Image: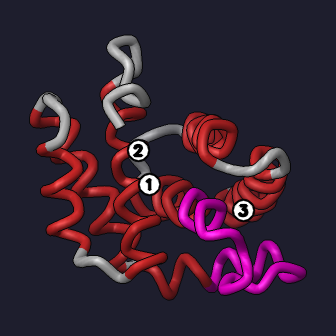
């Protein structure tokens, strides 16, 4: 994992990478989220703010998972959430949490980060799919706020 967390990578991106790994593990094999965060954070030397932001992201996604999954289903109706690739599903969950619930980064930044995660961890089609779904989510957000 340390190879994925390069020295030039920003603090928030490092936290997102670890959060995605935790969410993937929890979703695919049912491991305890807190134990998984503790294990992954301890495997590499990271500033405390990375582990804090990782915990914030994981906790936020898991607390709001049903609501987030409903949003995914609304904006990608042709793709039942349970049938999405596990990595794509969790990238979407993470980004939607940041866009709609966390509000700590601009919408475009959250989408760009999600697309970068998709390029790194997803399939060849993941970046386009992630970008499309999040574009639809953010367009709805603009109409709701506008």
Q: Is residue 48 above or below residue 18?
A: above
The quarter of the picture where the N terminus appears is top left
The disc at residue 88 is none
**Residue 132's x, y, as percent?**
83, 54
Query: Mark 3 falls on what kind of element?
Result: helix
Query: Label 3 vs label 1: CA separation?
Result: 20 Å
Q: Mark 3, residues whose alpha carbon is within 10 Å: few (<14), some, or many (≥20)?
A: many
User: What residue do we see at 72% from left, 62% from top?
Assistant: 137
Magenta span includes 80? yes
The disc at residue 137 is 3
Comes first in the chain, label 2 or label 3 = 2
Magenta span includes 35? no
**Residue 27's x, y, as percent?**
45, 77
> Which residue in the protein does label 2 denote?
16
Dot 2 and dot 3 residues touching (CB under 8 Å)? no
Q: How many numbered markers are drawn?
A: 3
> Which residue in the protein does label 1 denote?
20
Query: Mark 1 falls on what kind of element?
Result: helix
Query: Mark 2 falls on what kind of element?
Result: helix
Q: Mark 1, residues whose alpha carbon is within 10 Å: few (<14), some, or many (≥20)?
A: many
Q: Mark 2, residues whose alpha carbon is within 10 Å: few (<14), some, or many (≥20)?
A: many
Query: Label 2 vs label 3: CA separation?
Result: 19 Å
Dot 3 and dot 1 residues touching (CB under 8 Å)? no
Read off the magenta span: 70-91
User: What residue do we see at 76% from left, 51% from top?
Assistant: 126
The quarter of the picture where the C terminus appears is bottom right
Front tag of 3 and 1? 1
Comes first in the chain, label 3 or label 1 = 1
């Amino acid at each position: 994992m340390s190879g994925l967390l390069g020295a030039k990578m920003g603090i928030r991106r490092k936290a997102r990478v670890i959060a995605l790994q935790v969410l993937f593990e929890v979703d695919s094999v049912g491991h305890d989220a807190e134990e998984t965060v503790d294990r992954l954070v301890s495997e590499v030397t990271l500033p405390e703010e990375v582990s804090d932001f990782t915990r914030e992201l994981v906790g936020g996604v898991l607390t709001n998972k049903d609501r987030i999954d409903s949003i995914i289903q609304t904006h990608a109706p042709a793709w039942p959430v349970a049938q999405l690739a596990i990595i794509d599903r969790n990238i979407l969950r993470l980004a939607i949490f940041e866009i709609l619930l966390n509000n700590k980064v601009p919408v475009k930044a959250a989408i760009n980060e999600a697309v970068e995660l998709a390029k790194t961890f997803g399939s060849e089609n993941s970046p386009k799919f992630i970008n499309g779904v999040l574009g639809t989510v953010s367009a709805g957000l603009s109409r709701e706020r506008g």
